[in-house]
Every structure is written in structure tokens, then in C-alpha cells.
Amino acid sequence: MVPSPVEMFRDLPKKVCPECGEYIEEQAESYMMECDRCLANKEE
Ligand SMILES: [Zn+2]
């Protein structure tokens, strides 16, 4: 039984922001650990 690409993608672990615990949207070439909201707060 071979899992479909969609099922495999859903099994990927999501990154979680250590600052607020929010799930982080996967971003290509992204090495940031915090979510967009926390990153925006730090840049101010
Ligand atoms: Zn955050």
C-alpha cells in the first residue's frame, strides 16, 4: 500500500513558534524559527 503524495505531505511535522506556540507556515528557504508575528515584533 503506497501512500499518496497528499497523505505524505500531511504527515510532515509542522514547525511551531517557540515564542507563542503558533504553527508556522512552511516557507521556502526559510530558516527562521519564529512565526511571522513574533518576527515582526522583533524587527521593531
Ligand atoms: Zn510566534
Image (spheres, rainbow, N blue to C red):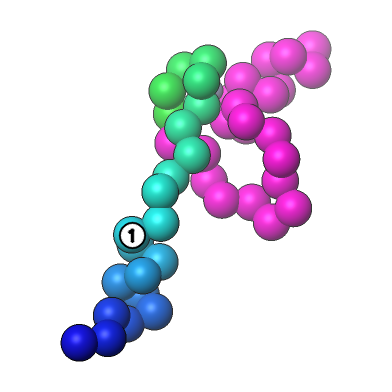
Where does the C terminus fall, quadrant-wise? top right
- Is residue 34 in the magenta section? yes
Q: Is residue 9 left or right of residue 42?
A: left
Q: Residue at x 70, y 23 (%)?
A: 40
How far across and how far down the image is residue 12, in percent? 40, 56
Return the x and y of residue 9 as percentages of the image width and height: 40, 66
Dominant SS of magenta comes to loop
9 over 17 or under it: above or below? below
Q: Quadrant of residue 37?
A: top right
Q: Is residue 28 above or below residue 9?
A: above
In the rendered structure, the answer to whether residue 29 lies left or right of residue 16 reads right
The percent coordinates of residue 36 (x first, y second) are 62, 32
- In-image side of 9 versus 32 (left or right): left
Query: Dot 1, crowdedness within 10 Å: few (<14), some or many (≥20)?
Result: few
The image shows a total of numbered marks equal to 1
Q: Report whether the residue tagged 1 is closer than 8 Å to ligand 1.
A: no
Q: Is residue 26 a member of the stretch shown in magenta?
A: yes
Location of mark 1 (residue): 11
Query: Residue sitting at 47 percent across and 17 percent down?
Result: 20
Please tell me whether residue 6 is drawn above or below residue 25 in the rendered image.
below
Q: Residue furthest left?
A: 1
Which residue is most to the bottom?
1
- Identified at 32% across, 82% down, the residue is 4
Type of amino acid under label 1:
Asp
In the rendered image, the residue lying farthest to the right is: 44
Check the image and report above or below for 35 versus 42.
below
Disc 1 element:
loop
Look at the image and tell me in which quarter the N terminus lies: bottom left
Span highlighted in magenta in the image: 23-44
Q: Nearer the viewer, residue 42 or 13?
A: 13
